Amino acid sequence: MQMRYSPAIRELPPEERPRERLQKYGAESLSTVELLAIIIRTGTKKESAISLAERLLSAFKGLKGLYGASLEQIAQIEGLGMVKAVEIKAAIELGKRMFSFSQGDEIVQITCPQDVVNLFPDLPFQTQELFKAIFLDVKGKLIKEKTLFVGTLDASISHPREVFKEAVACSAASVIVLHNHPSGDCTPSRDDIEMTRRLKQAGDILSIPLQDHIIIGKGRFYSFRASRSDIWTSRANVAE
């Protein structure tokens, strides 16, 4: 089978080269393949950076798949290697942080579960469960966020102690916790329900109320506050 010739970027007319097009028309005018080719910079003897970018996206079934790929998986693509894989992951991380936040950069107001979900665009793509807490002031403005646990969660883990230790340390007026389900299904498990009850009770005792517990799946999320009002009543039982 004869390999299709893939011209190097330098062989393309200037108006077709990704870097020149970005300079002239802006980054928003470039396709995902062209932007990725700029990051990759150089191709191989067999194919251009554009062709390599196309093959990379195809291997991971698009940008979302590439987002969730590990450094090692990217480096295994023929023509890339570890150096280019590191550069690609660095660019992805920068993009992620643009849609996230850093303490002190801006005032983040939390008014609904969607506001919380928007803060963590990477969570649906994580392959491990991450349990996070965000701490709010009396006006619902973000004070800080912290990842408290990594890995499979269960009700036996002392979440209340870790969550409210941080809340006291930063003088939070209230707390919201969230975690992801790598399966993509955001339906709460029995342990999720039990853990939420315990956190709600601990917050009530400490007068640092738990505002919500949000489970993030693929394209969906589950809000305990919106879906399980029984947990927010004073007569809610500890056992389901």
Image (cartoon, rainbow, N blue to C red):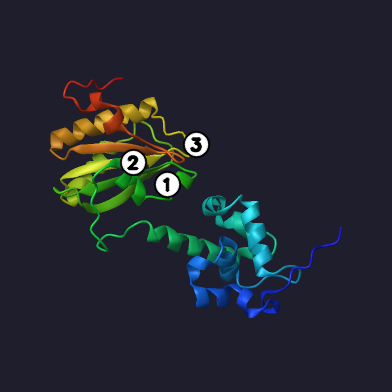
- On screen, residue 123 above or below 227: below
Q: What kind of residue is marked 2? A: Leu
Q: Quadrant of the N terminus?
A: bottom right
Q: Sequence order check: which comes first, mark 2 or mark 1?
A: 1
Question: On the image, numbered disc 1 is attached to which residue?
Answer: 123
Q: Residue at x 20, y 48 (%)?
A: 136
Q: What kind of residue is marked 3? A: Ser
Question: On the image, numbered disc 2 is attached to which residue?
Answer: 178
> Within 10 angstroms of label 2, few (less than 14), some, or many (20 or more) residues?
many
Give coordinates of residue 87: x percent, y percent.
54, 67
Task: Verify CB contact (< 8 Å) between mark 2 and mark 1.
Answer: yes
**Residue 39 lies in what quarter of the image?**
bottom right
Q: Residue at x 31, y 27 (%)?
A: 194
Taking the image as shown, residue 117 lies to the left or right of residue 1, namely left
Question: On the image, numbered disc 3 is attached to which residue?
Answer: 183
Give coordinates of residue 191: x percent, y percent.
36, 28
Q: Indicate the secondary structure of the residue bearing disc 2.
A: strand
